[in-house]
Image (tube, coloured by chain):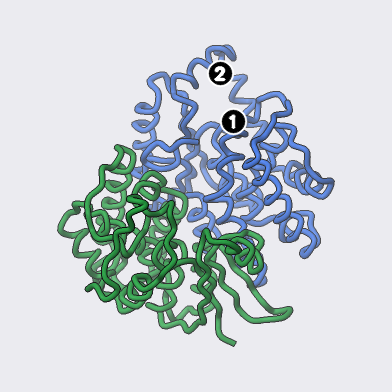
Amino acid sequence: MKLVIANKNYSSWSMRPWIAMKAADIPFEEVFVPFGAPLGNDEFKQRLSAYTPAGMVPVLIDGDTHIWETLAILEYLAETFPDRRLWPADAKARAQARALAAEMHAGFAALRRECPMNIRRPVRGRELSAAAQQNVARIEAMWGEVRTRHGGPFLFGKFCAADAMYAPVVTRLATYGIKVSRETLGYMEAVMALPAFAEWLQRHAARLREDASTADERRARMDAANPKYVLRNPTLRTH
Amino acid sequence: MTLKLIIGNKNYSSWSMRPWIAMKAAGIAFDETVISLYVEGSEAAIRAHSPAGKVPILIDGQGDREVRVWESLAILEYLAEKFPAAQLWPSDPAARALARAISTEMHAGFVPLRQQCGMNMWRPPAKRDLSEDAKANIARIETIWTEARMRFGAGGPFLFGRFCAADAMFAPIVSRFETYAIDVSAPVAAYMQAVIALPAWAEWRRAALRETWVIRKFEYDWPDVKRLATDAA
């Protein structure tokens, strides 16, 4: 299997299946296509088209099958590797895990807009709009409810696909110094303690060391590629 | 105890239509509760059923064994597991993977189209000026439908031959394409006709046209509310 992903610093959608596969010990070959190519998004799309006609990241390639959209990738993995238990075994817990994952997939626009994933950004507080604060409150309430019911440390006890869906939110809450409850911090620590999480950060750091360009050059390159947009679908979509 | 589905207005609530039409088309029995959106008390009424504060909500069982599922996609996955004979997802793994990918793309995507062509079943069909973004959404949806039909549609008129959850996810788009008189290719028009010919579609639409709740922000000609006759064909 191949997983085509974009920048580990910015692409929250890439992080989700990557961390799920690592944490579930599913072997795969990683194909990295950076956003910040010198010619911008057209070049990104052109490079991506060498791997997949889907025109977006992340994409899972299994033989002739190309699967895009994070949730669809997670469902495919859950079916292909049933012993890895990517969804909880209990039907009721599984239904809730899918609901949480789906809510993440289409929701929390204000938080995502105001706090984009940016792993190397120094931790600094940020004022949130009322809408983003509501997003945080809803996320904390959801996490709290299922962790209380299932005993933690992850949302449904053991790590599952719902945790993978929220892993980028964990980095956002940390990066932007969002004030959260002790219970929420406990969950964030559990996610950040995953070896897969550490590996994502290490791989990102290693790539930065290989990249001889300066921070300013990298920023200029990202700016040229229009950082206001994140590629998820064939059409560019506002972040 | 039968399943219970909490939904919003049939005229406007595209998210409600998805699991409803899936259950009807698959012959899964359920009781429905309709809560009009954006009226006094409706938010509290929805929150009483689910803290997510959004319709649709599926309730299965009661007491300790009660399961409440929100988010259309999660509801469809729950139904697909609980009623395997209904085959809500295609049985072929490659077809199923594509069905889930396009359903998920629908779930979080096509925002410009959704904003500029809100579902409004009683609105008499007429064109609207659309942004380039919305036109790009339409082109992408046509590609998705055409590709699914070409690759997996041989066994019937739907995206994967027989009706499945992906058709349910796109049913409100069929309604929008009709309402806003979107020009489409012949194969896309044929697919739309197959969805519109579902008895479940007619049942939903008949109820939508008879609703009396008018939501100002969904009526683009407000204060004028253009409406088809309640018995319109």
- Foreground pick, A163 / B204: B204
Quadrant for residue B2, please give it: bottom right
Q: In the rendered view, does A99 fall on the left or right side of B170? A: right
- The spot of residue A42 in percent (x, y) is 35, 28
Q: Is residue B125 above or below residue A224?
A: below
Q: In the rendered view, does B70 fall on the left or right side of B154? A: right
What amino acid type should be assigned to the residue bearing mark 2? Asp
SS at mark 1?
loop
- The spot of residue A24 in percent (x, y) is 64, 53
- Foreground pick, B167 / A6: B167
| Label 1 CA crowd tier, 10 Å (few <14, some 14–19, many 20+) | some
Pointer 2: what residue? Answer: A211
Q: Do the residues indicated by labels 2 and 1 lie within the same chain of the protein?
A: yes
C-alpha gap between disc 2 and disc 1: 14 Å
Give the letter of the green chain: B
Q: How many marks?
A: 2
Chain for disc number 1: A
Q: Earlier in the sequence, mark 2 or mark 1?
A: 1
Pointer 1: what residue? Answer: A9
- The spot of residue A205 in percent (x, y) is 65, 26
Image point (65%, 46%), residue name = A135
Tint of chain A: blue
- Foreground pick, B202 / B45: B45
- The spot of residue B187 in percent (x, y) is 18, 60
Residue found at the very far left of the displayed protein: B186
